[in-house]
Amino acid sequence: MQMVMDTHRVVKRLKEAGFTDTQAEVVTDIVRDAREMDRDDLVTKNFLKAELAEFKADLLKWLLPMMVGQVALTAALVKLL
């Protein structure tokens, strides 16, 4: 759900607090830009789940052969002793 910021109201409140017209408009623009930038950087829960599933698959792809190799190496060393 996208929330819309009432920039006119924000400018009005800042001017009532003692800001000049220019100051109030600049501050409002900065806040609006920051809100939009933050939304662009957010990821969805589904995206994170997909990334985690891919990471798990990659991890298993590398760990399982290493574990098998380690067991084989250990078994070979035990035979030599």
Image: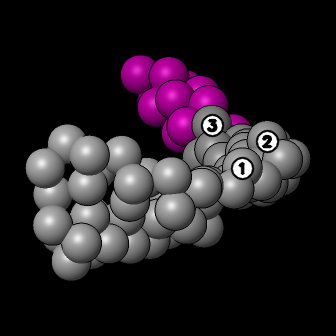
Q: Amino acid at mark 3?
A: Met
Q: CA distance from mark 3 to mark 1?
A: 51 Å
Is 77 a magenta residue? yes
Secondary structure beneath dot 2 equals helix
- Residue 53 lies, in percent from the top left, at 81, 46
| Region of the chain picked out in magenta, as a range | 68-81
Q: Amino acid at mark 1?
A: Met
Is 7 a magenta residue? no
Q: If you read the primary sequence from the N terminus, does the residue marked by circle 2 or circle 1 appear first? A: 1
Residue depth check, mark 3 versus mark 2: number of the one nearer the observer: 2
Pick the front one: 53 or 67: 53
- Residue 57 shows in this picture: no
- Residue 50 shows in this picture: yes
Question: Mark 3–mark 1 contact, CB under 8 Å?
Answer: no
Label 1 sits on residue: 3
Q: Amino acid at mark 2?
A: Lys
Which residue is most to the front? 16
Could you tell me which residue is drawn at 69 percent across and 56 percent down?
4
Left or right: 10 in relation to 1: left
Judged by its main secondary structure, the magenta piece is: helix
Q: What label sits on residue 44 in the rendered view?
A: none
Could you tell me which residue is drawn at 41 percent across and 22 percent down?
81
Please tell me how crowded label 3 is: few (under 14), some (14-19), or many (20+) other residues with Cα within 10 Å. few
Label 2 sits on residue: 45
Pick the front one: 42 or 39: 39
